[in-house]
Image (cartoon, rainbow, N blue to C red):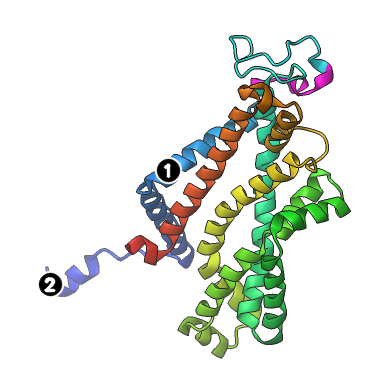
């Protein structure tokens, strides 16, 4: 066989489309992310704990009847009953099973934490990217606004806003989001200032790319890791803020939450009377969930930040 014949019978290399190449890169990136995250033991433990609590919140109707959270439906139950075979975590001063308050409260507290944190990070990302990318007077105005929210203590500001705006669930979520975005905005602004000076961003500008194209295709993907990490770290802040507001008696009207359960224990003098099952489980749950979100956030920061991963 001549060289020309061998050349003619050689296999033709497969020509892959740009879309298939992008899909393969995404799959490889997801595999690498999963493998790197599994190396973060604290992050894996935190994720498992969060999955358990989210499952409890979703399965609340299966675990406990919602009527058990209503004082009018539990008048026949024993009051301040210690944990027993019938009442696993005991009852409160109205005869309500503590376990019903906890699993149904998980729905409210986790919903407030997740939604408020998402809104907070959206506001922080919009302000931080705009401030860092555009510079000039927009940066000056937005930076002064960030500083104002950073200087004012979050809880007193939230108390004032709730007193003025009302105490329904949507208002509580909005107030927590408004009072917690400034820290994330400052971090995202710093990262945006670094990204916008890189060569590929300058090249895109020189080729005539619009500001929207540069922000969405170049700036946003590069600040996304810090956005994701801050999102998981903002959730516990939102949960603690709701618990604080509810404990002070200005939480959302109606329903139950972990913070409201603590407020009910306080108003029932559970600590003075030694009814530990009324306040200790919910306190441990809040602490565990907040710690778990922090562990997941730190793990994501290490996985998504190359400098921390190298260390």
Q: Secondary structure at mark 1?
A: helix
- Front in this rendered view, residue 171 or 79: 79
Rendered location of residue 263, percent (x, y): 73, 34
- Residue at the limit of the structure toward the front, as seen here: 272
Q: Nearer the viewer, mark 2 or mark 1?
A: 1
Instruction: Looking at the image, tell me whether mark 2 or mark 1 is earlier in sequence order.
Output: 2
Rendered location of residue 27, percent (x, y): 43, 55
Rendered location of residue 122, percent (x, y): 67, 61
Give the magenta range. 62-72
Look at 60% across and 70% down and name the residue there.
Answer: 186
- Front in this rendered view, residue 72 or 53: 72
Rendered location of residue 96, percent (x, y): 73, 19
Residue that label 1 marks: 44
- Front in this rendered view, residue 48 or 82: 82
| Residue 305 visible here | yes
**Residue 152, above or below 233:** below
Residue that label 2 marks: 2
Q: Which mark is residue 24?
A: none
Q: Residues within 10 Å of mark 2 (few under 14, many from 20)?
A: few
| Residue 15 visible here | no
For the N terminus, give its image quadrant: bottom left
Look at 78% across and 15% down and name the residue there.
Answer: 74
Look at 65% across and 82% down and name the residue there.
Answer: 134
**Residue 290, above or below 17:** above
Q: Secondary structure at mark 2?
A: loop
Q: Is residue 120 left or right of residue 199?
A: right
For marks 2 and 1, give the CA distance. 60 Å
Q: Is residue 244 left or right of residue 207?
A: right
């Amino acid at each position: 066989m001549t060289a020309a014949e061998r050349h003619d019978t050689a296999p033709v290399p497969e020509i892959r489309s740009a879309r298939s190449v992008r899909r393969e890169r995404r799959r490889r990136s997801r595999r690498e992310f999963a493998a790197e995250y599994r190396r973060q033991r604290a992050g894996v433990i935190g994720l498992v704990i969060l999955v358990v609590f989210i499952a409890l919140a979703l399965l609340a109707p299966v675990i406990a009847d919602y009527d058990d959270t209503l004082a009018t439906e539990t008048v026949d139950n024993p009051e301040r009953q210690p944990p027993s075979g019938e009442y696993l975590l005991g009852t409160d001063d109205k005869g309500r099973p503590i376990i019903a308050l906890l699993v149904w409260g998980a729905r409210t507290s986790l919903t407030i934490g997740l939604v408020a944190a998402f809104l907070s990070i959206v506001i922080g990302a919009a302000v931080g990217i705009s401030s860092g990318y555009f510079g000039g007077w927009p940066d000056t105005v937005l930076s002064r606004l960030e500083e104002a929210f950073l200087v004012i203590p979050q809880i007193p500001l939230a108390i004032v806003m709730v007193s003025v705006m009302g105490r329904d669930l949507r208002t509580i979520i909005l107030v927590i989001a408004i009072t917690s975005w400034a820290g994330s905005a400052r971090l995202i602004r710093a990262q945006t200032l670094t990204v916008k000076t890189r060569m590929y961003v300058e090249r895109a500008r020189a080729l005539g790319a619009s500001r929207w194209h540069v922000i969405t295709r170049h700036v946003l993907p590069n600040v996304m890791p810090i956005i994701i990490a801050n999102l998981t770290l903002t959730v516990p802040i939102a949960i603690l803020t709701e618990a604080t507001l509810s404990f002070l008696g200005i939480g959302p009207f109606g329903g139950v939450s972990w913070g409201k359960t603590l407020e009910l224990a306080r108003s029932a003098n559970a600590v003075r009377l030694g009814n530990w099952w009324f306040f200790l489980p919910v306190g441990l749950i809040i602490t565990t969930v907040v710690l778990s979100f922090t562990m997941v956030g730190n793990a994501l920061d290490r996985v998504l930040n190359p400098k921390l991963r190298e260390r």
